Image: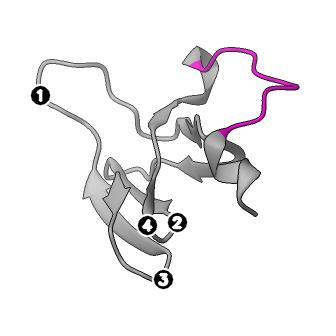
Amino acid sequence: MLNNHDTDTLSVTLNVNADGFSDWSGKALVNLLNPKQTATVSSDGCATLSAPNRGYSIWVLKKDAPSISGIIFPTEMYR
């Protein structure tokens, strides 16, 4: 997700269940660039995802996220 707003964190609610792929309803998602940020896919297949101002986020199933403890991500360097 890309956010080009100067000052605001923005979010969007969207359907993450694509035709031809497994159902993600009830699954946990994690932002790879800020692992403290998570979302749960609702029963209707929707999830609300966000990105920081002038930044981006990359969302994946939490169970598929690599183990990333100790890594400093670009978004953390400027906070």
From what the image shows, is residue 33 above or below residue 10?
above
How crowded pointer 3 is (Cα within 10 Å; few <14, some 14-19, many 20+) is rated as few
Task: Tell me the tag on residue 19.
Answer: 1
Cβ atoms under marks 4 and 2 closer than 8 Å? yes
Cβ atoms under marks 1 and 2 closer than 8 Å? no
Question: On the image, numbered disc 3 is attached to which residue?
Answer: 8
Task: Tell me the tag on residue 52.
Answer: 2
Q: Residue furthest bottom?
A: 7
Callout 2, which amino acid? Answer: Pro
Cβ atoms under marks 2 and 3 closer than 8 Å? no
- Distance of mark 4 from mark 3, alpha carbons? 8 Å
Report x, y in % for residue 79: 76, 63
Callout 1, which amino acid? Answer: Asp
Question: On the image, numbered disc 4 is attached to which residue?
Answer: 54
> Quick one: label 4 or label 3, which is nearer the N terminus?
3
Callout 4, which amino acid? Answer: Arg
